[in-house]
Image (spheres, helix red, strand yellow):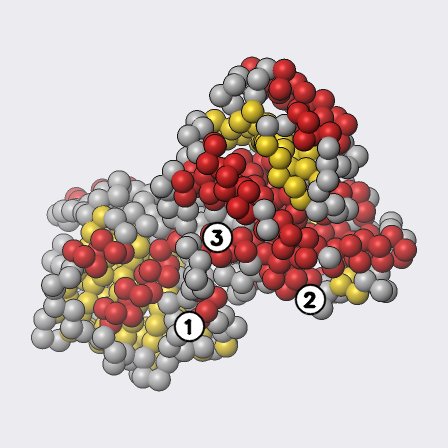
Amino acid sequence: MCGIVGYIGHRPAWDIIVKGLKRLEYRGYDSAGIALINQEKGLRTYKKAGKVSDLEAFAADVDKAGSIGMGHTRWATHGAPSDRNSHPHSSGDRRLSIIHNGIIENYAILKEALQAKGHEFRSDTDTEVLIHLIEEIQASEKLDLFESVRIALKEVVGAYAIVVMSEDEPDVLVAARKASPMVIGVGDGEYFIASDASPIIEYTKNVIYLKDNQIAYVKKDELVIKGTDNIVDTPYIQELELKLEMLEKGGFDSFMLKEIYEQPRSIRDCMRGRIYPKEGKIQLGGLNEYADKLKNIDRIIIIACGTSWHAGLVAEYLIEEYARVPVEVEYASEFRYRNPIITEKDVVIAISQSGETADTLAAIELAKEKGATILGVCNVVGSSIPRSTHAGAYTHAGPEIGVASTKAFTAQVTVLTLISLFLAEKRGTLGQTQRVQLLTELEEIPALVEKCLEANEHILSIAEKFKDATNCLFLGRGTGFPVALEGALKLKEISYIHAEGYPAAEMKHGPIALIDEEMPVVVIAPQNSSYEKVISNIQEVKARKGQVIAIVTEGDKEVKKMADYTIEIPAANEAFLPLIATIPLQLLSYHIAVLRGCNVDQPRNLAKSVTVE
Ligand code: AGP
């Protein structure tokens, strides 16, 4: 979490930084700040609790001259969101300044030692400790900025992406990373530094992804990258595939709505060049090298967090059904701390939209140490998770900016469906005729998703009825269960209505006690193998006067007789239900949240990329 931007070159730094911070605001938005530097005026810092727009208003009349600067948008960890805890943070003498994404875990010990040497702190953050440590090292050892930062980082335990400036070296930025992302854009007589490529894309396509334990010395016409061991590394410059229009709302009111509507395209992109329905073949280039190993595995462990974990639950159904391999789905945060049994025979699939989730990364490292083969299913190209896995498949959904995952989820489910069929083909557990049939149906899914989107106005009318609800239950069976979990997560995270997802049959083991005439219950009730059972569950809800909103197959008559509201989805193979049934739930949450006046793109307390554990 937290977004960082740095600029050094010949253009006005303020404008580039503000624009960049707005692009990175999905990473955190409780406060923002900018520091500028130039030879005449020295180091100036402006910071404010609130969004980047609040910072702009606050700094409307300040002198913004300067072609070197850095900015930060914060997701608070240490210290409440406030002006004084906002970044950049300065050294005691205010000659040094830092922005930071991550957590300095040993900040308390370092702080105590620095206080004993007379350092006084102005904030409650871990970050301020680091700039005082740099100041202390610089003063006592008479080192330049780069060396002081390098030595200080040797004393730091934790995760960081930092940019540091000094009034004494007004033409230098020093940047470093460990377990937090950082990209350097290479321009013509200018460099850009950012948490991801989105602030950089309109200026240059040439970027360097800084690696863990690397430190960059950046001047407008010079870049030196070293390791913390002081050995020079040759940077690898790569070309970005990202396009500017992918980062804009394209006429929609919010990124979330745009991303919901992008799903026919994103699912299609995800399958492009990977499925050959006539031949019943699946081509996953990234997995080919491991095809032999995948033929003979005893178990797959899936690790992920949040929505990605829900995609993992869908995969459990599909992989066990088609490839007949036992699958365990684990929260990365639990898995990494419970001494799990992992052997060299295990295959671990790590799922992550951002590719930066700290718990998922740590769980990967643990499984790697124990010899497992790690496959990644990620969206952000070049992010940390794909770089730390042995092989994998990108989801190709394009940038997802709304904090609530929508198109990333359906793209993850699409890739995982392909992986299940790839495994089935390699392991000989699914005949060619079945694969031809399934792939032919899968190819039609984007068109069916388009049909689901046609229900938007009808879903808005249902949302109007439930906008004041305080609780909501989501029920489903089979692959409808992860869909229910995902529907509940969407509603709670963007509308702040308390919502829970349950396997429909579990309702009688507790949640049924909550049902009364005030309780909306969203039931995933398509005409598939559990249709009759789900109808019984709807009866149980209605018998207790709950209000049922049912997701039903087009033309359904049975459920329509008993549900208060129905939303139709096109008929499709049961295996692909999550790709279709999720769409109306995304729209329902979206409309309820908008009607309640919530900011759907930036829900309170959340951040898109969870780079702290
Ligand atoms: C859901 O809408 C959230 N964005 C969140 O649960 C997310 O899925 C989770 O933080 C994991 O993120 P990742 O996919 O980037 O690893």
Q: Nearer the viewer, residue 40 or 48?
A: 48
Q: Earlier in the sequence, mark 2 or mark 1?
A: 1
Residue 140: image location, x then y, percent: 18, 60
- Amino acid at pointer 3: Leu
Q: Position of residue 433 (x, y in %)?
A: 90, 55
**Looking at the picture, how far across and down is residue 611, in whole percent?**
43, 50
**In the image, 43: left or right of 26?**
left
Horizontal side, residue 224 vs residue 418: left or right: left
Q: Quadrant of residue 95?
A: bottom left
Residue located at (56% from left, 38% from top): 487
Upstream in the sequence, badge 3 or badge 2? 3
For the point 56% across and 24% down, the residue is 547
Secondary structure beneath label 1:
loop
Depth check, mark 3 against mark 2: the one in front is 3
What label does residue 170 carry, if any? none
Q: Are marks 3 and 2 in contact (CB under 8 Å)?
A: no
185, 551: nearer the viewer: 551
Q: Is residue 152 above or below residue 50?
A: below
Report which residue position mark 2 lands on: 272
Residue 613 on image: x %, y %: 44, 43
Q: Which residue is mark 3?
A: 257
Q: CA distance from mark 3 to mark 2?
A: 24 Å
Mark 1 highlights which residue?
201
